[in-house]
Amino acid sequence: MKSNRFCVIMAGGIGTRFWPMSRQSRPKQFLDILGTGRSFIRHTFDRFTNIVPKENFIVVTNKRYRELVMEHLPEISDSQILCEPIGRNTAPCIAYAAYSLLKSHPDAEMIVTPADHLILNEKEFERVVESSLEFVAYRNALMTIGIQPTRPETGYGYIQKSNSEEICKVKCFSEKPSREMAEAFLECGEFLWNSGIFIWKVRDIVAAIEEHLPEHATLFASIVDKIGTNEEDSAIEGVFSACRPISIDYGVMEKAENVYVHCGDFGWSDVGTWGSVYQLARKDKYANALSSDEINVYDTRNSVISIPKEKMAVVSGLKDYIVVDTPDVLLICPKSEEQNIKSFIEDVRFESGDKYI
């Protein structure tokens, strides 16, 4: 295990698509939605401990979640948590971590990962990450991990690879496609799902930010001397208030010439919706995904039903539904309408404020 390797876990999202289980006070990354006994962020941390020393983890999160991070990852110190005052998408998040490392460990290799993804084959995942680290160590390369697609998924971004080798240059990125386009991508064989996991040297990503997001580079460079001091929080407040929100994909990866993809096939999912939870969960003989043995179903099929552990539920006559019960909110929604959950949240906020959000 090399001491110059760092893992940056992005853990600032609110996870609105998993409402009402995911709330502003405890979002998706701190939940055990799949019933594994560990939260998503705990799984993510454990996944990298064979690759990165525990003292080399950095968690970038919203300042309101600092205590939650410490609760779920007691091994890390307070100094390993970087707090965003407001969400500004992934480019400012990654820039904050990169410029922090540039000051303390300028020769570091940097893995960037979301906090809330699922990986089933962790041994194969380790192999892919190690292979990617070896590749970028002696090259000026920005690496992303692409996933061999198994279906025409419209909820993921795609990466077109330049050849059939395991590591190759990226031809182009494509955002969430239509069903017809996703089917064409799958049939073509040149496209991978974009996992949102990145690997590079700190100096290389900083150089790329300077070239492709110069306004962000100027802001972060101006406060580097304050990182790690008592002035950091106020300096970061100023930077994030001035930062344009943009993803690292749009801001850097789609523009840079030195972008490579490592093809992976290790049982990956971003577990982005209740529908994806349904796909991943064990199901009864009627294809229902049930969170508890205390759920009795009658004439109910192809549904995902989640209730508190101490509660009994009887469900009858539902087909292709999402049912999520929490102590203060009950959601009942056809699976085909789960894309409307964000609008449901806005209506609830309009009527009741943030009480149920």
Image (cartoon, rainbow, N blue to C red):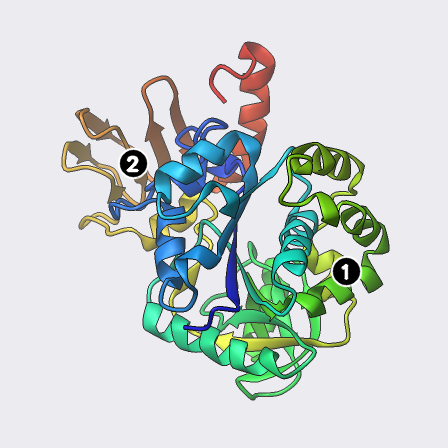
For residue 305, the mark is: 2
**Tag nearer the camera, 2 or 1:** 1
Q: Amino acid at mark 2?
A: Ile
Which of the labelled discs sits on residue 262, or is there none? none
The secondary element bearing badge 1 is classed as helix
- In this view, the residue in front, 301 or 254, is 254
Q: Position of residue 159 (x, y in %)?
A: 63, 70
**Res. 86 visible in picture:** no
The reply, left or right, for residue 292 in relation to residue 30 is: left
Say which label, 2 or 1, has the lower sequence index.
1
**In the image, 129: left or right of 88?**
left
What's the residue at 65%, 65% (across, down)? Answer: 106
Report the residue at 44% width, 32% height from top: 67
Tell me residue 66's x, y (percent): 49, 35
Residue 335 is situated, as x and y percent measured from the top left of the image, at 43, 40
Q: Residues within 10 Å of mark 2 (few under 14, many from 20)?
A: many
- Taking 302 as reference, is 130 left or right? right
Residue reaching furthest to the top: 352
Q: Is residue 249 above or below residue 229?
A: below
Which numbered disc covers residue 209? 1
Observer-nearest of 69 and 260: 69
Depicted 313 relative to depicted 160: above or below: above
State the residue at coordinates (52%, 62%): 6
* Residue displayed at 53% across by 84% down: 166
Q: Residues within 10 Å of mark 1 (few under 14, many from 20)?
A: many
Residue 297 occupies quadrant: top left
203 lies left or right of 339: right
**Residue 286: percent from left, percent from top:** 22, 47
| Tally of numbered tags | 2
Q: CA distance from mark 2 to mark 1?
A: 44 Å
- Location of the N terminus by quadrant is bottom left
Q: Which amino acid is tagged 1?
A: Ile
